[in-house]
């Protein structure tokens, strides 16, 4: 049996527990059954943003006549070259990870699947391994719904959509979460005819006013509350049959079909039944407030624990565990700062904290300030016809407990509020600072002014 100080299962966010411990003399083994770098590098955040950014340039160039700015020719893109560059860059980064590990005498990299055969023993089918600390960072994979006929067709998941053999002229997307909105917007900008179908609301967990604004400015047509009955692939076309919100049968067809209906944890092939590790009903690993599983010495973090589904949250958890086990912050429970999220679609969306609906449900008293992009100097300059900043402030503490933005640069704009939340800034702190005029951040200031107005009205 090979013994290590640390075993890491998953070379995505799991890398946070590979190189740093090795630099303080820990012997580390890392196992990865797919390509190093995990979903974010290979099948998620990075390649998707590399695909999305050029599409935004096309979208911007296509919407200039109102200024008025004219181009002699309609903007176009060499989509084949864009995807080629994306995949070559991703492969280069992924390939560099094992090379770096090979140069480190304290790291052994195994491109293999491992499973538990006992509470602290793993096997790759040939050899066995154990360690003082074991970290499970196996992430998630697309969840494929049970739709009659679907699994017999050559449908796509986000993996294939980010590395297509051929760019389709038409695309149906099942689902209306962030993957659907991001990839659908990009494909539409590149000239593909995109249709979305979802059985629920579009971006169903978002704040209600954000959803309302998004529905006014969808990047491509999406039919919500659509119940799919069957999927078939015939003569080079996907045919989706279902019933719409009125209960009427309708049929959609396209060259390609993307299924983006959520995710499921990669825990069903780890041999967890040979350990005391417990999962919830959905298969996510249950952990304590120090990210330890119900098997002492074995920890889990990232998507596989089902708390947050972002690379930035997984990185935070990995850094916490390093400090908790090998640094100066031992025996302290993890304390998450405000956790932001963004959808890089068009219009862009960013959020942090509670939605208004959650505050109402929890009966938490709050002030609300909503300011449209158009109600600012930058909005006038950009001729913004959409977008808003919404802030939710606690009546008790006057601190921000929720913020939601839809519009240009939303993912950047949210950080101003995020920093204030982290530092426990109060309403007057946001209003007391000086904002550059006429920067886009004035939209946020105006939202806080609306909160102040609401507060003063309530005081009368």
Image (cartoon, rainbow, N blue to C red):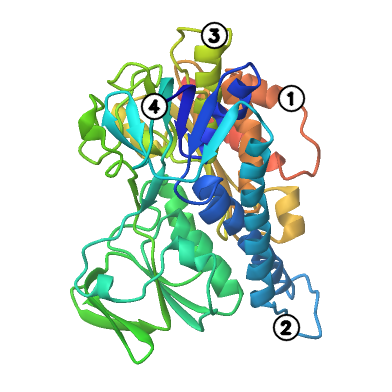
SS under mark 4: loop
Give coordinates of residue 457: x percent, y percent: 50, 27
| CB atoms of marks 3 and 2 within 8 Å | no
Which mark lies nearer to you, 4 or 2? 4
Residue 209 is marked as: none
| CB atoms of marks 3 and 4 within 8 Å | no
Which mark lies nearer to you, 3 or 2? 3
Residue 74 is marked as: 2
Which mark lies nearer to you, 3 or 4? 4
Give coordinates of residue 442: x percent, y percent: 71, 40
Where 308 falls versus 160 (above or below)? above
Q: Nearer the viewer, residue 110 or 360?
A: 110
Query: If you read the primary sequence from the N terminus, does the residue marked by circle 1 or circle 3 appear first?
Result: 3
Give coordinates of residue 111: x percent, y percent: 49, 46
Q: Which residue is mark 1?
A: 433
Q: Which residue is mark 3?
A: 329
| Residue displayed at 55% across by 58% down | 345
Q: Nearer the viewer, residue 323 or 194?
A: 323
Query: If you read the primary sequence from the N terminus, does the residue marked by circle 4 or circle 2 appear first?
Result: 4
Q: CA distance from mark 4 to mark 2?
A: 64 Å
SS under mark 3: loop
Which mark lies nearer to you, 1 or 2? 2
Q: CA distance from mark 3 to mark 2?
A: 57 Å
Where 314 falls versus 146 (above or below)? above
Q: Residues within 10 Å of mark 2 (few under 14, many from 20)?
A: few
Q: Residues within 10 Å of mark 3 (few under 14, many from 20)?
A: few
Q: CA distance from mark 1 to mark 2?
A: 43 Å
Q: Which residue is mark 4?
A: 1
């Amino acid at each position: 049996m090979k013994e290590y100080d640390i075993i890491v299962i998953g070379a995505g966010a799991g890398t946070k527990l590979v190189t740093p411990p090795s630099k303080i003399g820990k012997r580390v083994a890392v196992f990865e059954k797919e390509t190093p770098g995990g979903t974010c590098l290979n099948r998620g955040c990075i390649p998707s943003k590399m695909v999305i950014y050029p599409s935004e340039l096309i979208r911007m160039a296509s919407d200039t006549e109102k200024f008025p700015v004219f181009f002699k020719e309609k903007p176009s893109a060499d989509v084949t070259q864009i995807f080629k560059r994306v995949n070559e860059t991703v492969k280069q980064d992924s390939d560099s990870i094992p090379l770096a590990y090979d140069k480190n005498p304290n790291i052994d990299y195994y491109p293999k699947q491992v499973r538990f055969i006992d509470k602290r023993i793993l096997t790759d089918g040939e050899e066995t391994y154990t360690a003082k600390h074991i970290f499970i960072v196996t992430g998630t994979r697309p969840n494929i719904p049970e739709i009659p006929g679907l699994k017999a067709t050559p449908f796509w998941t986000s993996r294939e959509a980010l590395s297509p053999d051929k760019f389709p002229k038409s695309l149906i997307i099942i689902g209306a979460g962030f993957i659907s909105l991001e990839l659908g917007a990009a494909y539409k900008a590149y000239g593909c005819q995109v249709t979305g179908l979802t059985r629920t609301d579009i971006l169903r967990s978002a704040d209600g006013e954000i959803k309302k604004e998004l529905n006014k400015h969808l990047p491509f047509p999406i039919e919500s509350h659509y119940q799919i009955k069957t999927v078939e692939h015939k003569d080079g076309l996907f045919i989706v049959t279902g019933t719409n919100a009125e209960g009427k049968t309708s049929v959609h067809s396209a060259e390609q079909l993307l299924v983006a209906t959520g995710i499921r944890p990669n825990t069903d092939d780890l041999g967890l039944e040979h350990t005391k590790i417990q999962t919830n009903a959905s298969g996510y690993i249950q952990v304590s407030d120090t990210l330890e599983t119900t098997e002492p010495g074995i920890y889990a973090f990232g998507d596989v624990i089902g708390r947050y589904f972002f690379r930035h949250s997984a990185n935070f958890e990995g850094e916490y565990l390093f400090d908790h086990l090998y640094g100066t912050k031992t025996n302290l429970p993890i304390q998450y700062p405000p956790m932001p999220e963004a959808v890089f679609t068009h219009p862009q969306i960013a959020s942090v904290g509670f939605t208004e609906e959650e505050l109402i449900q929890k009966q938490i008293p709050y002030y609300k300030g909503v300011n449209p992009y158009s109600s600012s100097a930058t909005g006038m300059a950009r001729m913004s016809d959409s977008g808003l900043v919404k802030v939710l402030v606690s009546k008790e503490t006057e601190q921000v407990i929720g913020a939601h933005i839809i519009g240009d640069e939303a993912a950047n704009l949210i950080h101003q509020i995020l920093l204030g939340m982290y530092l426990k800034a109060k309403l007057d702190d946001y209003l007391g600072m000086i904002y550059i005029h006429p920067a886009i951040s004035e939209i946020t200031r105006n939202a806080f002014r609306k909160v102040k107005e609401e507060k003063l009205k309530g005081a009368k």
